[in-house]
Amino acid sequence: MDGIKPYHIGITGSYGGLNLGDEAILKCIIDQLRNSLPVEITVFSKNPEDTLRNHDVDKAIAVRELSREEILPEIKNLDLLIVGGGGIFFDGEVNIYLREVILANEVAVPVMIYAVSAGPLTNSSNKKLIRDCLNKAAVITVRERDAKKLLEESGITSRIQVTADPALLLPPEPIPDDSLQREGLNAQQRLIGISVREPGLAAPDIDEKHYHSLLANAADYMVDRMNADIVFVPMEREIRDVQQSHAVIAQMLRPQHATVLKGVYSPGQMLSFMNYFMFAVGMRLHFLIFAALQNVPFVALPYASKVIGFLDDLKIVTPPIHLVNAGRLIAHIDNSWDRRELIISKIKEKLPELKKRAKQTNEIAVSLIQSLSPGKIDYTI
């Protein structure tokens, strides 16, 4: 069927910021759309060059650099604006991520909220902004039940559907056979991966002093108990995770057994790298998702509802980070290490349903696109 006119789809969220979790989400949204419909995709990105280099998109717009008047024509040209996924609705930045939604509403471009998380969200002005914007959306999907509850409490009266994180559908990509050697790691040594994250607007309750000490003690314990080397995995490719990782290592008694990954990896390559780990301890959600996708048993340090939601879906019980001291965390790690085969069994049991829910978000998007623009497809005989 030659001559099919593509749908013009815009995607906005936390993209181009060099965070492997966000980039995994974007890749999966793009791949599923392209596998379902003829589309031209525009991404509103913090780093258009990075987005064009690493993703199969037709255009990338420097969303944080352009004025309202400069962005508006790009939005007006769309058949649908996709907002998300990821944890983008939180105090301090929700107004940034909703700017394109406001503009889309002005020019009658339909909006789909795509598998987002919400919170922390306590500011009344932010709740009103979300309420005003999202009640006009054509479709709202979130990736965990707590996000649905929080949006409803903020005044959303439209239907909210719970799906799952798009990154659950990420395919692995090949990495060089000598990847461990390049990182200065011994392929014969047992390796345990650790993920940290910095405090900030999306994680205001993280106490650096507390968790640095917590992880340093846990890392030393795993070196001795499991005869392992510790590998810190920066999911944020700039300096934040690297700095936090080195801060933890600085407090270890056995820092010679710890290293921070230095290479630049795509999300799919990092997913493949997870295969080298026999066990994992992590804060960042997508580090835990990558571990689950590779059947790596893990202990989480939940700092936000999005992490707790993922653990609930897997039926893995973990105390939140602010309720854990070094002794309790070490005991939990020790128990999880002994029960790692059971953890793997839980992951294998629950993951297919999560992947199915992740696919549903794209199915909802495709149905919406086709219903909104019945005259867009032009079959030339």
Image: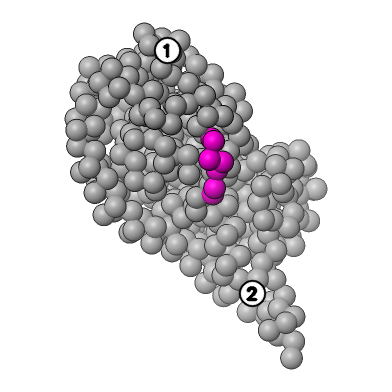
Residue that badge 1 annotates? 255
The image shows residue 72 at horizontal and vertical percentages of 75, 53
71 above or below 179? below
Label 2: few (<14), some (14–19) or many (≥20) C-alpha neighbours in 10 Å: few
| Residue 1 on the magenta segment | no
Magenta residues, start to end: 173-179
Q: Which kind of residue does numbered mark 1 sit on?
A: Pro
Residue 212, how many percent across, how many down? 40, 16
**In the rendered image, the vertical position of residue 138 relative to residue 90, given as above or below:** below
Marks 1 and 2: which is nearer the front? 1
Instruction: Count how many numbered circles sit on residues in the image.
Output: 2
> Which of 311/92 is in front?
311
Residue 242 drawn at (x, y percent): 54, 22
User: Would you identify the image quadrant in which residue 93 lies?
Assistant: top right
Q: Which residue is mark 2?
A: 373
**What's the amino acid at mark 2?**
Ser
Of helix, strand and loop, which one carries label 2? loop
- Counting residues from the N terminus, which is met first, the one under dot 1 or under dot 2? 1
Q: Quadrant of the N terminus?
A: bottom right
